[in-house]
Image (cartoon, helix red, strand yellow):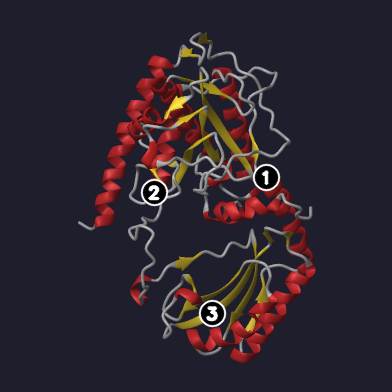
Amino acid sequence: MTLQIALLLIGIVIVVVVAFTAFDRNRQQGALRRRPDGGIENPRERVAPTIADESATYPSAADGAALPSTPARTLRADASVTLSKPEPARRAQEEIMLLEDVASMPLDLDHGIKRLRSAQARVTAHIDEHIEFVMYLSGGAPVARDVALGPYKQEEYRLDKPHRLLGRVADGQGWTELAADPSRTLYRDLALTMMLVDTHGAASESDLNALAQAGLKLADALSRQTRFSLEFDEALRRAHQLHQFCEAFDVIAAVNVGAVDADGLRGQLIERAATRLGFEFSPQRVFQMKSVAAAGGRELFTLASLVEPGVFDPAAWDRLTTPGVTMFMSVPLVPHPAAVFDKMADAAIALAEQVGGRLLDQDQRPLNDQGIAVIRRQIEEIGEKMLAFGVEPGSESAQRLFAPAVAAARGAGAPA
């Protein structure tokens, strides 16, 4: 039995256990839920969501850095119209879907160490014409990696947007990036791709022309035929749509845990509670909740101090006090974001109980079950609209569009 099969079986077992646990927990606690102030909230009373217009001060969940200034908006918990709480069975089903999706993700067995790739360990690349402008170069005899890279490097300076040169090997179907392949690799087809949106906004006509010129020079050098994925006018419209899409859905969901008095939250209690809840302390000196379905699973949400820059000193837990901590997630960067938010909200409630704190919203006001439901509904709507646009939350395309570096710069004067 291979390692991958063994891990998959373990993931299936975990899915079943979590499903039954989640169902039982919701069955017992679904009727009444304790407020941060000690009262009981009626879970049937919910209000409709609104989304904040101002910038947030929380980082992206996949960033790892704590509390930099970011243009991503934070979902708000204030609204006016009632809505119902998700049924326990529906919530359990969402958790199962989340675990199944994460269990099927490629395993990162290198633990962050870049390994030398061989012909047997080639990493495939996905071309997404939904978010990329692509120039295909086909025909002719197979071409070697270094032969193709030579003329490409001479023209690469023209390309300002994120770009890649991909190849499809003579005896295979998948695309790979030439820069990561062995030098003797032979390709049947080549593709030059460019993102239609980046930190500076939508791709312009000059960006498309730059890719076309670089691609035509490469095609002439290799005697290849060319084909574009889109007409220029259509590509420009698509780029503008993508920019608007990123502006609309680059949002963060956050739940804060604040101290009930001026003494603040004690560092030792925070560290112990975070460890019990399954957080991992990261090299960036914040806690991260990762998927338990597969080794090397992605980060789902982060726990940081409310005091900028948000990091913790692991050598000073016994001396640390803070007015509060925050849990946050980047909505478009995680699969099944509503289910991830449920997990994060439950973790925040448990943390508050263990450290003697109370739940607060983004404005440091008490956050009850009603406010949590408001944020959750906004997350559901974002997920639905992303799918309607053709970008699944947590997918490779979403990662490329909403990466922290892109989000950090997009709101700092990017053209609309």
Residues at circles 3 and 2 in contact by the CB criterion of under 8 Å: no
Q: What element carries label 3?
A: strand
Q: In this view, does 248 lie above or below 35?
A: below
**Picture quadrant of residue 1:** bottom left
Residue hosting label 2: 297
Residues at circles 2 and 1 in contact by the CB criterion of under 8 Å: no
**Picture quadrant of residue 281:** top left
Residue drawn at x 62%, y 19% is: 83
Lower sequence index among marks 1 and 3: 1
Q: Marks 3 and 2: which is nearer the front?
A: 2
Within 10 Å of disc 2 (Cα), the crowding (few <14, some 14-19, many 20+) is: some
Q: Marks 1 and 3: which is nearer the front?
A: 1
Frontmost residue, 355 versus 265? 265
Task: Residue 380: give x, y in percent of width and height.
Answer: 58, 34
Query: What number is the disc on residue 79?
Result: none
Task: Residue 26: give x, y in percent of width and height.
Answer: 41, 20
Please, what is the three-letter code of the amino acid marked with disc 3? Answer: Asp
| Horizontal relation, residue 198 to residue 394: left or right | right
Lower sequence index among marks 2 and 1: 1
Q: Is mark 2 on a helix, strand or loop?
A: loop
Rounded to the nearest angstrom, the CA distance separating label 2 from label 1 is 27 Å
Q: Is residue 89 visible?
A: no
Query: What number is the disc on residue 71?
Result: 1
